[in-house]
Amino acid sequence: MKTTTLLCTLLILFASFSFTKKESSGLITGTYGVCSSGNEMARAQLPALVLNDDLTFLYTGLANDGTPFSVTGNWFQKDNTILLDNYIAESPIHHKWKIDRNEKCLKSRMGLHYTRLCNLKACK
């Protein structure tokens, strides 16, 4: 009897976890960058990722050697991740971005290089 009760309880708990719907992220398209009060010249050197409603992107910043880069292509969302696709870049770029818990920032890792960009509307 105890075994049956325990088994039924575990089955109900498993079923409740299996059927709970994970809420989709509320990603807001727009410009993601570094919140800075610096001048326009300093802000131009910081990385920025623009996600457009038509599923295109523009990613700008400085490469490792200090030269500016600008990459365009398409993006799509898979679960809690933004993936950049169909782009041509001279050097590797951050192409996989995780959406932060607060859904206002994106973070990426490429080797030991970490980048975190926030929606610039949230900076104000």
Image: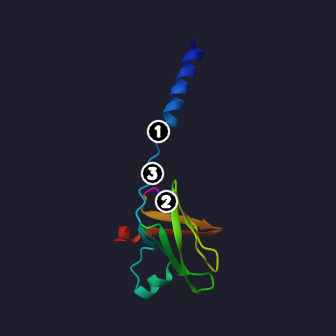
Say what secondary structure mark 2 lies in: strand
Examine the structure image and report whether residue 99 is included in the region drawn in magenta. yes
Q: In terms of sequence position, does the residue under pointer 1 or pointer 2 come before the other?
A: 1
Closest to the observer, 54 or 101:
54
- The residue singled out by tag 1 in the image is 20
Q: Position of residue 83 (x, y in %)?
A: 55, 63
In space, the residues marked 1 and 2 are separated at their CA atoms by 21 Å
Q: Secondary structure at mark 1?
A: loop
Kindly identify which numbered label has been placed on residue 99. Answer: 2
Task: For label 3, count other residues whose C-alpha is less than 10 Å away and answer few (under 14), some (14-19) or many (20+).
Answer: few
Which label was assigned to residue 24?
A: 3
Q: Secondary structure at mark 3?
A: loop
Point out residue 60 in the picture as x, y percentages from the top left corner. Answer: 51, 79
Residue beneath the point at 52% across and 36% down = 18
Q: Residues within 10 Å of mark 1 (few under 14, many from 20)?
A: few
| Distance from Cα at disc 1 to Cα at disc 3 | 12 Å
- What colour scheme governs how the chains and residues are painted in the rendered image of this protein? rainbow
Please tell me which of labels 3 and 2 falls first in the chain: 3
x then y, percent, for residue 123: 37, 70
Q: Is residue 56 visible?
A: yes
Residue type at mark 1: give it: Thr
Give the number of the mark in front: 3 or 2: 3
Residue 40 image offset from top left, x and y in percent: 41, 86
**Chain part drawn in magenta:** 97-102
Q: Evaluate whether residue 81 shows in this view.
A: no
